[in-house]
Amino acid sequence: MIDRRVSLVLAVAGFAMVAAPASAASARRPARPRMVSPTIPQTPSLASYWGAKQGDTRTYRLTATQFTQQIANFPIRTATVWGYQAPGQAPSTPGPTLLARQGDRVQLVLTNDLPQPTTIHFHGMHEPNGTNDGVPGIDTSPIQPGETRTFPAFRPGHPGTFAYHTHAYTAEQEPRGLAGMVIVLPRRVPASRNPQEDFAMTLQQFDPPSEGALVDPMPASVQFPFNTINGKTGDASGGPLTIRRGDLVQIRLYNASPKAHAMHLHGQDQRIVAINGHPVTPTTVTTKAILPGEFFTVQFRANNPGNWIFHCSFSSDQANAGLSGYQGAPVGMTRVFHYQGAPPVPPQYFSFSG
C-alpha cells in the first residue's frame, strides 16, 4: 500500500515537472493582437476612386485632360492644368486617389484628351514589364491624342502607399499636374496601429504666369510661386481637418513636385511608420524631408487640443507667390488640424484674398 502511494506521488510530481515549463512558455508568449479592418483614407480636396470590381480585378478608367482648377485664393485663384478625370467626377490635379485592397488585381484604362502623346506609370508598384511600366521608347509606345488604351491587370506586390504619373515628356507633363496617389490597403491590421483618421496628401508646385493661364512647367526663377497639398494652397483648402483628442492620426505623403520639402507638424511629435510603401521601425521626428517621388507615412497621437498647422518648413513654400495670408499666416503648402471642441480656426484664414 505504501509503495503504491509513493509511486502515485512520484508520478504526480513528474507530471508537474514536465508540465511546468510548457505553462511558463505559454505565459511568456505574447498575446496575439486584435485585428481589425483598416480605416479608409481621406483625401482632402480630392475625390477617391475604388474603380469597378469584377472578380478579383479593379478597373480604373481615367482620362488625361486639360482644365481650369482653383489652386489659391490670392494673388491669383485659378490656373489651367493637366490632370485626370474618373467617371462621374470632376477632373483634378492631383488625380483621384485610387484605392484597392490586398489581393486585388488592378487594371487601368486611360484615354488621352491632351494635345500631345502621354503614358501612365505605376510608381513604386510591382507592375510587369512590357506596356504596364508606361515608359515610352522602353517598354511601351505613347498613347496618342484621342486614343484609349487598356493595360493588363496585375497585382501591386504588397500593400502600401504608391502613385501614378505620366512618363512621357515628363519635364513638361508632370509639372502641369499629371500625377496622383494609389493606396493598397491590407485586409486586416493590428487595432493598436490602426489610425482613427487617415489623410492622404500629395505635394505639388505650380507656376501659372497669370490668372487662368496654362502653368509653365519650369519657372523663370528657381522658386515655384504656388506650393500645394492636394492641388490647393492652405488658404484655398476650404477648412481645417477635424480630429478628436486621443485619436491616432495618420498622414500619407507623396511628393509629386520636382524639389524636396521639409514637412513639420506643430504641437505634437510625428512618427515615421512607413517609407516608400514599406513599414519601418517607428522613428520620432520634428521635421522630415521628403524627396521628389518619395512616399512617407507618419502618425501622431492627438494629445494637445487646439489648432495646429502641418506645413513645409521652407519659408518660400509657406507663401503664395511670396505673399502671406490672413494677418501674415503661412499659406502655400499648409494644412490646419482642428481638434473637435477647440476654438474654431478664424474663418478669415480660408477667405482671405490678399
Image (cartoon, grey):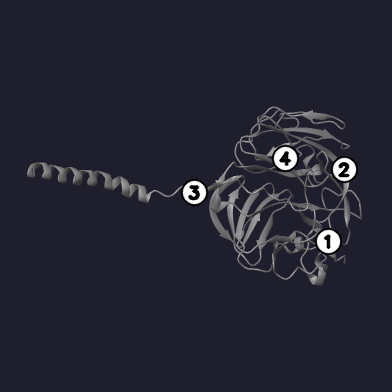
- CA gap between label 1 and label 3 equals 49 Å
Q: Separation of disc 1 and disc 2 at Cα?
A: 23 Å
- Which label number is shown at residue 189? none
Residue 125, image x, y percentages: 65, 38
Q: Amino acid at mark 1?
A: Ala
- Left or right side of 210 for 142: left
- Toward the viewer: 11 or 26? 11
Give the residue pinned by disc 4: 50
Residue 243 found in image quarter: bottom right
Which of discs 2 and 3 lies nearer the camera? The answer is: 3
Quadrant location, the N terminus: top left
Left or right: residue 323 versus residue 201 is right
Mark-to-mark CA distance, 1 and 4? 36 Å
Q: Which residue is mark 2?
A: 66
Q: Position of residue 101 (x, y in %)?
A: 64, 39
Q: Which residue is mark 3?
A: 33
- Among the two numbered marks 1 and 3 on one chain, the one whose residue lies closer to the N terminus: 3
